[in-house]
Amino acid sequence: MVSPLMDHHRPSWIALRQRLWPDCSIPDHMAEIAQWVADPTRYPCFGAFRDNALVGFIEGSIGIHPMTDLSNPVAFVEGLFVDESSRKKGIGRALIEELEKTATRRGHSTIYSDTEAFNTASIAFHLRCGFHIFRATATEVVFEKRIV
Ligand SMILES: CC(C)(COP(=O)(O)OP(=O)(O)OC[C@H]1O[C@@H](n2cnc3c(N)ncnc32)[C@H](O)[C@@H]1OP(=O)(O)O)[C@@H](O)C(=O)NCCC(=O)NCCS
């Protein structure tokens, strides 16, 4: 089941965030989550739950984004993580699709994402989910996907 992430999900949300961003401090995780939940229009975030436990999350943003070099607001995947034991079951795709629905409702016809150039699993995942490469450098890949 995929549903919006709220402040009361913070402990399990931080536990997953720590695995995606191990260099981020707990106070920084707390501050970022506080910012996201305070403004879900700007930062739509969704969790995937199995047996009421959080097993994955997606953090999105809708606004001007420096990674695209575009002057118009875009929908962007800021973070995506699925617990190792729940991978390859369609959860990552379901989280992307939930953010796409939000973006579509807000009038966007494309969605963007990025990953590190060494993250071959993430690159394969994005391509399987219909993204194409918008820009690539030695260190990062930016993806674009038409959603309508
Ligand atoms: C990338 C990630 C979110 C994928 O989540 P997932 O729930 O396993 O993905 P899904 O099961 O929804 O897979 C969707 C498609 O991508 C493919 N895919 C997923 N992981 C893959 C991998 N490691 N290698 C190749 N293809 C992969 C699936 O086979 C599937 O394709 P199909 O539907 O055509 O068969 C997950 O592996 C993860 O959290 N990785 C660590 C964090 C990360 O890299 N996040 C993204 C960058 S911020």
Image: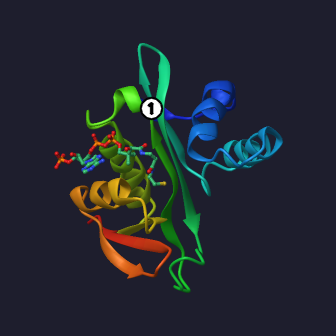
Instruction: Find out if the beta carbon at label 1 lies less than 8 Å from the nearest ligand 1 atom.
Output: yes
On the question of residue 24 being in view, the answer is yes
Mark 1, residue position: 83
Residue 35 placement (x, y as % from top left): 74, 49
80 shown above or below 64? above
Residue 117 placement (x, y as % from top left): 43, 69
What amino acid is found at the position of numbered circle 1 in the picture? Answer: Asp
The residue at the point 28 percent across, 58 percent down is 124
Residue 144 location, quadrant: bottom left
Q: Is residue 50 left or right of residue 17?
A: left
Q: Is residue 107 left or right of residue 28?
A: left
Residue 46 placement (x, y as % from top left): 50, 40
Q: How is the image coloured?
A: rainbow
106 shown above or below 48? below
Q: Nearer the viewer, residue 69 or 106?
A: 69
Q: Nearer the viewer, residue 2 or 138?
A: 138
- The quarter of the image holding the C terminus is bottom left
Is disc 1 surrounded by few (<14), some (14 to 19) or many (20+) residues within 10 Å?
some
